[in-house]
Image (cartoon, rainbow, N blue to C red):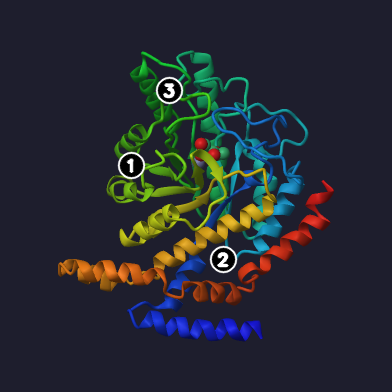
Amino acid sequence: MKEELIQQSYKIAKERYAAIGVDTDKAIAELEKTQISLHCWQTDDVVGFERNDALSGGIQTTGNYPGRARNIDEVRKDIEFVKTLLAGNHRLNLHEIYGDFGGQFVDRDQVEVKHFQSWMDWAKENNMKLDFNSTSFSHPKSGELTLSNPDPAIREFWIEHTKRCRRIADAMGKAQGDPCIMNIWVHDGSKDLTVQRKKYREILVDSLDKIMEENLPDMKACFEAKLFGIGLESYTVGSHDFYTAYCATRKQMYTLDTGHYEQTENVSDFVSTLLMYVPELMLHVSRPVRWDSDHVTIMNDQTLDLFKELVRADGLHRAHIGLDYFDASINRIGAYIVGTRATQKCVLQALLEPLAKLREYENNGQNFERLALLEEAKSLPFGAVFDYFNLKNNVPVGEDFIPAIQEYEKNVTSKR
Ligand code: RNT
Ligand code: ZN
């Protein structure tokens, strides 16, 4: 019965969209191909398996909802379950601290491909591709400065770490026959005033250039800028202008995290300029509430505008979509599903925009018509298309994923 209703609603929606020149089947096919890189760190509050210590280094999780994944098996089990509730084939984004260290302490400048072999095997079995991140936080050598540290010993330590991470990413890319995207984010900055802003930026550029020297064809690096970190409020070495210039001059991928901007800025406005000067974008889709709080992504204006802008700029295929939030105050699996599905909804809405007509109006100077269609497009039956997309892919439609998560909580996470 329900299935029939979904089919019928889709049929009507399809006609409604066709009337304004939008092909819903095509949008669904595009959405099915759109992979989202699931951030492994939502399962365990960004703790990882290196020292099982609290998170430090510019970022913070809040909340202590029961059921955190405590080891590699629990993380994998959670991701396997998450996959069953999502339409489409997604990727997994790992941080270096999630290596399979076999109970040994492996320092960051010692990490090797072998520590990720079991992840690569697991990924293959589960038909998932991997992405990767070097980890500069939560370590005694993190301090205020890592790759931009004037102390050569500390700086070398982090250069070595990041070089090794690039090799691991390259091995992952080779194994999966598709480049592994490796994000480089360092929290480097200063809590209080500094009189040597330029000096640290010069050191950072030099470190990054050294890290990028080796030719590794099966990985792609991306560089994440930020406004400020917790405890590092006065200065951020890797600011937006810094990495925009770095990526533009080095022809590298730029990571745009939606939590890393001033609260009154609309992140989508950066997309078109970046697409002109950098080859590709990595997205960290998140939700800042008053600060870079990493709340669960929802279908809000910021996220909608981001994907609309990508589609309008013909840039969706040049963007790699990843999630980046860590809410420890609610069911963590639920957080995954809500955030991933919200991201898919935003991509779908962007794909369903009557762009040809809107562009035509704009080119003709018909600005009332443009505004009117933009407004009308907001209330077109996109929900019916999203329901059908999930039905077609045999995953729960609408709120039906709630009981599935409650069941998993009852049987699995609540027992941790
Ligand atoms: C921090 C950055 C970074 C981290 C992850 C864990 O502000 O957004 O991407 O969240 O690497
Ligand atoms: Zn991020």
Answer few, some or many: residues within 10 Å of disc 3's Cα (few below 14, many 20 plus, some between 14 and 19).
Answer: some
Q: Which amino acid lies under the numbered mark 3 shown in the image of this protein?
A: Ser
- The image position of residue 61, as x and y in percent, is 62, 37
Residue at horizontal 72 percent and vertical 40 percent from the top:
64
* Disc number placed over residue 251 in the picture, else none: 1
- Quadrant in the rendering for residue 313: bottom left
Residue beneath the point at 33% across and 42% down: 251
Q: Earlier in the sequence, mark 1 or mark 3?
A: 3
Q: Which structural element holds mark 2?
A: loop
Is residue 114 visible in this depiction of the protein? no
Point 40% across, 48% down: residue: 281
Mark 2 and mark 1: Cα distance apart in space: 30 Å
In the image: residue 329, left or right of residue 349: right
Q: Nearer the viewer, residue 135 or 105?
A: 135
Residue 195 appears in the picture as rendered = yes
- The N terminus: image quadrant: bottom right
Residue on which the image places disc 3: 234
As drawn, the label of residue 175 is none
Q: Circle 2 is placed at which residue position?
A: 88
Q: Residue at x 78, y 51 (%)?
A: 413
Q: Earlier in the sequence, mark 2 or mark 1?
A: 2
Residue type at mark 1 is Lys
Q: Can you give x and y, in whole percent of width and height, for residue 380 in the image? A: 42, 74
